[in-house]
Amino acid sequence: MQSYKICGGKMLSGKIRVEGSKNALLPIIAASILVKDIVELENVTPLEDTYSMIDILRLLNVRVIYDHKSKMIIDSRNLVNKRISSEYTSKLRASYYFMGALLALYKSVKVGKPGGCDFSTRPIDLHLFAFENLGFDVVEEKNFYKFKKEREPKKIIEFSKVSVGATVNAILASVLNKGTTILKNVAMEPEIDDLIDFLNKCGSKIKREDNKIIVEGVYNLFGCKYKIMDDRIEAETYVVIGALLGRNLEIICDCKKYMKEFLLLMNKVGAHVKETSCGVIVNATKEIKEQSLIFNVYPGLPTDIQPVLTILFTKSKGESVFEDNVYPDRFSQVDELVSMGYNLHLVDKKLLIRRNNAYLDSVVSCKDLRGGMSLIVAAILSNKTTCIKNCEYISRGYYDVINKLKRVGAHIEKI
Ligand code: EPZ
């Protein structure tokens, strides 16, 4: 168990480099098994989830060479269709991308059920709906799903609800189909565009048209070299930290174009964020204007920044109100934050955020990735001492976060 003691209230100066996007990388790793050639990925982040995906590749007899920094070579020429047990798939939610990828290649597939942060119920009915429409019968067993190709795929698949994961899986499962598949009511997240760009660089023919994705099936794909996009959620997280404690804190990233809604909000509430050619420079702001915010699918304010953004609005004179349209119950960290002295109230799935009078020494525990990160941000803002347990959740989505914060002046020590 990773636990840290944080003595907060210190101003932060210096540079923080944003890593490659976890939520772009994981689908591309699964997609690489569709390529019977060598794939070279750059800007790969050595996260816990990255290694969990590598374990599954190796189980499928895929050769993986990874420098544990940013370069990964994947060779799927000797891929085998093996059942992926839940021992592997339960470690992360993105393991389910191997369902779509294997269904593109084989008529009969068995994959264990996914795991991942449980801040909310996270069904996969939309994924299974896509697979059924692509011609597969799905049988749910205790810990895994069995898929069997029984009929021709439908040409048009329209989702009842926007889902990032289901959109990714439908693309993966239709890339090598004969003919064209039209996906409707799809997710617009840029991480999906990174996957599309990767697959098109390997020879697929996929394009977006309004809220549709059109997949023209190809016979096979060839190897390529591809650079993963930067992580917009990591970048936004450090911008929030800079708005609270920054003294010329420089966030180096090239994903500003995917952060428009967030940067507009920073400007609107009075945060001192200056865009530069290689990212942004952020200075702490005394006063943040209160807001009523709804977090939504892209291009709306991303749900993944909602827990961290909570801490920024504790600096407002008035009351802010947060609602999360993607995960209405995504407030797992509120009780822990209240025990640190933060003035938060959850009423009918709305989070009321007010300025607090005093911080408290406390011991708190992470319960998931983004909620855990909000505890770190709350602890470095508080002028008291906070012990945070189960920080391994955080290293699933924020690479080297403790050292990055220590290098710019945060007082954090491992306990
Ligand atoms: C992806 O999760 C991300 N994870 C999440 O990031 C992110 O919060 C989410 O997209 C929304 O942007 C990865 O990319 C690995 P969804 P995903 O399917 O695909 C419901 C992080 O912290 N739904 O877009 O699971 C679902 O319950 C993680 O990095 C169904 O009802 O999200 C939610 O309410 C957390 N049935 C909504 O749709 C389904 O079959 C959107 O979920 C699938 C989803």
Image (cartoon, grey):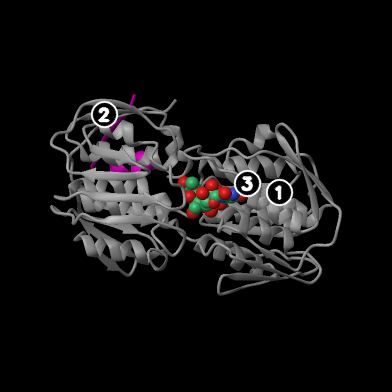
- Label 2 sits on residue: 339
Could you tell whether 154 is left or right of 40 in the image? Answer: right
Residue 208 rendering spot, x and y as whole percentages: 59, 72
- Label 3 sits on residue: 124
- Label 1 sits on residue: 99
Magenta extent:
401-415
Q: Which amino acid is tagged 2?
A: Ser
Q: Which amino acid is tagged 1?
A: Met
Work out which quarter of the rendered image holds the N terminus and state it.
top left
Of residue 399 and residue 125, the one placed in the foreground of this image is 125
Res. 103 in view? yes
Q: CA distance from mark 1 to mark 2?
A: 41 Å
Q: Is mark 3 within 8 Å of ligand 1?
A: yes
Image quadrant of residue 213?
Answer: bottom right
Q: CA distance from mark 1 to mark 3?
A: 11 Å
Q: Secondary structure at mark 2?
A: helix
